[in-house]
């Protein structure tokens, strides 16, 4: 599932292509991907301009000139492609937005969705989310205090969007590795020093993934050489039985509440 770095990269790229551009056509091939009858959704979008593209947690928000917003969540396996009638992946596209000849394809939205929402509906949806890791207000003292109230293991806490926004199965493991803490470690057992290590691991881990290109499986456009390059740079995620990049010990896998989790048994405590 795309997490903060992947969605942030999408935001940056889509902004270059679509901000200021009017939507000239809407094609919905899966009614369940949107939140209202197709004719209603289509007429609300047509001829509206995209005036901004924002990210909150794993959501992308397209601000429309009508004052409403498109709220996108790719969930598990969803992805996007920028192309045209002539150039697009040979896949079923659940939603297609046209901007003249250029098209934005939404692919594999099985659980994912593109909803048209009012400002109030958007606020309500986002209000439950925890802090953004790159928000200047996200500080150690607050993190420490909120963590002290949490039961459970680090992995489960890090992927809880109410605790911190944008982190999922991959980066929770990567962050724990960076902090030299096991994903199975209980928050209650952390010393102040270890809480600090955990906090200090969050931003660098996400920044690195963002710089490298995130871990998507598909390019965003033809000749896209960046999207997905993090697939070759995982520290521990999906690295079972490979040598730890820090100490050479073989990485192990364990399952935490049915989620796979990877760690080094030697240098993560
Ligand atoms: Zn190690």
Image (cartoon, rainbow, N blue to C red):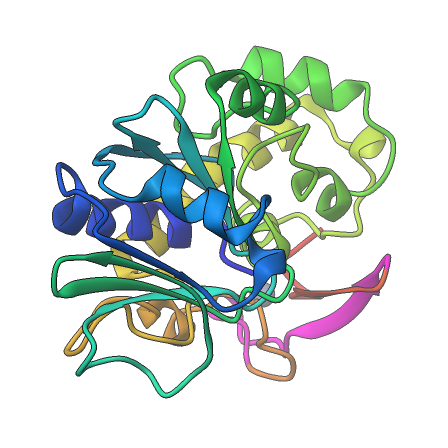
Q: Position of residue 207 (x, y in %)?
A: 34, 45
Q: Position of residue 159 (x, y in %)?
A: 67, 44
Corner quadrant of residue 127:
top right
User: Would residue 205 be visible to someone looking at this image?
Assistant: no
Residue 249 is one of the magenta-drawn residues: yes
Is 128 or 261 nearer to us in this picture? 128
Residue appearing at x 48%, y 33% in the figure: 200
Q: Which residue in the rendered view is the most extreme toward the bottom? A: 90
Q: Position of residue 136 (x, y in %)?
A: 38, 16
Residue 221 is one of the magenta-drawn residues: no
Q: Is residue 5 above or below residue 124?
A: below
Is 224 or 15 nearer to us in this picture? 15
Q: Quadrant of the N terminus?
A: bottom right
User: Would residue 264 be visible to someone looking at this image?
Assistant: yes
Q: Which residues are magenta?
A: 243-257
Horizontal side of 11 relative to 148 (left or right) equals left
Horizontal side of 122 relative to 153 (left or right) equals left
Is 119 or 174 nearer to us in this picture? 119
Q: Is residue 242 above or below residue 134?
A: below
Q: Is residue 85 above or below residue 101?
A: below
Q: Position of residue 147 (x, y in %)?
A: 72, 23
Residue appearing at x 65%, y 32% in the figure: 194
Residue appearing at x 18%, y 73% in the figure: 84
Secondary structure mostly taken by the magenta-highlighted segment of the chain: loop
Residue appearing at x 60%, y 31% in the figure: 164
Horizontal side of 247 relative to 184 (left or right) equals left
């Amino acid at each position: 599932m795309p997490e903060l770095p992947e969605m942030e990269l999408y935001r940056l790229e889509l902004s270059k292509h679509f901000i200021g551009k009017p939507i000239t056509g809407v094609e919905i091939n899966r009614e369940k991907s949107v939140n209202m009858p197709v004719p209603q959704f289509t007429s609300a979008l047509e001829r509206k301009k995209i005036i901004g593209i924002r990210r909150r947690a794993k959501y992308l928000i397209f601000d429309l000139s009508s004052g409403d917003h498109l709220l996108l969540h790719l969930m598990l396996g969803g992805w996007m492609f920028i192309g045209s009638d002539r150039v697009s992946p040979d896949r079923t596209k659940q939603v297609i937005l046209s901007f003249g000849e250029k098209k934005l394809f939404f692919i594999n939205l099985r659980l994912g969705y593109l909803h048209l929402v009012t400002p109030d509906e958007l606020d309500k949806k986002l209000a439950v989310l925890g802090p953004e890791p790159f928000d200047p207000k996200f500080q150690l003292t607050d993190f420490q205090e909120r963590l002290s109230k949490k039961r459970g293991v680090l992995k489960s806490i890090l992927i809880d969007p109410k605790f911190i926004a944008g982190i999922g199965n991959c980066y929770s493991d990567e962050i724990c590795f960076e902090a030299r803490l096991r994903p199975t470690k209980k928050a209650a057992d952390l010393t102040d020093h270890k809480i600090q290590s955990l906090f200090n691991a969050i931003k660098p881990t996400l920044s690195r993934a963002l710089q490298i290109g995130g871990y998507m499986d598909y390019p965003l456009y033809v000749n896209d050489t960046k999207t997905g390059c993090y697939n070759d740079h995982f520290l521990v995620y999906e690295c079972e039985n490979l040598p730890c990049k820090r100490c050479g010990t073989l990485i192990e896998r364990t399952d935490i509440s049915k989620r796979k989790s990877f760690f080094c048994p030697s240098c993560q405590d």
